[in-house]
Image (tube, rainbow, N blue to C red):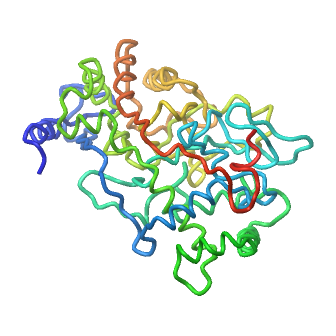
Amino acid sequence: MLPSTHLRYLLLIGLFVVVGCGGPKPKEVAIEDAIQVDTIFTALPLEIVEPRDNPSNSAKEKLGKLLFYDPILSGDKDISCATCHHPDMGYAEFLDISIGTNASGLGSDRKFNTPNEIPFVKRNAQTILNTAFNGIQRNQTLSAENAPMFWDDRVQSLENQALEPIKALEEMRGLHFSETEILHVVVDRLREIPEYKELFSVAFDEEEPITEINLGKAIAAFERTLVTNNSRFDKFMRGDKNAISLLEKDGFEQFKKVGCVNCHNGPMFSDFKMHVLGVPENKKLPQMDLGSADQGNKDSFAFRTPSLRNLRFTAPYMHNGSFMDLKRVLEFYEDIANGKTRNPNIPKSKFDPLVSELNLTVKEMGQIISFLNTLNDTNFDKTIPESVPSGLPVGGNIH
């Protein structure tokens, strides 16, 4: 049972309806023509929803963690999942767009080896934290099997997501194996390692436990342990009025008033929908010979709304890491409101109407950023295995 003060607070927020992205007054926009968005927020759940065919257990989570840090999963055995999703960086990385295989270093220090024929990854690595909640909406049952993944929503579920980087040439696969054979290669490698044979047997009670499907299931089980559901905002929404300051409460009100709430809503501060924003191309594009512009979901230049949780750890921001800090992100939205465009590939007519009227002052930006800091939570698993069963360097070539 929720505290009565919490119920009253939710009911009050429930009465708030955003009219248009910038929240114009009723006399400016007829109510029947307005965009109406449910703006109720809730704390993140305390329980994790799992797929029916992949219930977690400690053995599976332990196995998944070792696989997450083991470069045996990459074509050239030089990069792991943790390379671009490291706990020291909030399971993201301090890099605008990712550098995958045939490279060394971590975060902003990562550089390609010489010689190199591997392209850069065109997108910023999103954090793994709270991906267990991807797709969650207020008052709806989360479907772990259909949870949206990646900036372009190209696969659903953590189980499927875990396998995609292994298959991607510029991420983990490299040049020596085809996309159709790499998972078979990885599975064969794992079957040759006695410790993995034992770990998979304990985690999966099957005649042949080391399979592509179980590889994805184990990594997903570990990733579902990486949750931060006790931020100051979560405590506030559970009834602790003093969990956030008066300035941060003002920022919360501004966040709703100016229209950020239209896309960043619900427990994860994301509607998990695709939006065309006209984000500028990464400035490194010409120098890195990335080819054509990243056109996102179905070549529409649309990208999924990211969560606003743990922004402290996830800079640079946007799908291609074009903005180094939150102030620049908010200034970008202000430019949209003033009719400016920063991407010649995307005409204004293609912009999502939800962002077309957002308008901010410098004071409001500061208040909103103060509020966003209440969504940070440092209480997550930062431990790194001392070794991995393959005997390869933990995390890959990151030192």
Residue 283 in the image: x percent, y percent?
A: 70, 28
**Along the viewing direction, whichever of 374 and 207 lies nearer the viewer:** 207
User: x and y percent of residue 315 in the render?
Assistant: 55, 31
Query: In the image, what residue occupies the spot 64% across and 44% down?
Result: 84
The residue sitting at the bottom extreme is: 207
Q: Is residue 281 left or right of residue 12?
A: right
Q: Which residue is painted at 58% across and 60% down in the image?
A: 162
Q: Is residue 144 left or right of residue 238?
A: right
Where is 251 relative to 284, above or below?
above
Residue found at x 67% / y 46%: 83
Quarter that holds the C terminus:
top right
Which residue is found at the position 75% from the left and 58% from the top?
391
The number of callouts visible is: 0
Q: Is residue 293 left or right of residue 61?
A: right
> Which corner quadrant of the image does residue 334 belong to?
top left
Which one is in front, 329 or 206?
Answer: 206
On the image, the x and y values in percent for residue 364 come to 35, 17
- Between 272 and 248, the one lying in front of the other is 248
- Image location of residue 60, percent across then percent down: 51, 67
Left or right of 199 on screen, residue 21:
left
Please tell me whether residue 122 is drawn above or below residue 26 in the rendered image: below
Q: Is residue 102 above or below residue 376?
A: below
Q: What is the residue that sits farthest to the top in this orientation?
A: 363
The answer to which quarter of the image holds residue 87 is top right
Note whether 332 is above or below 295 in the view shown: above
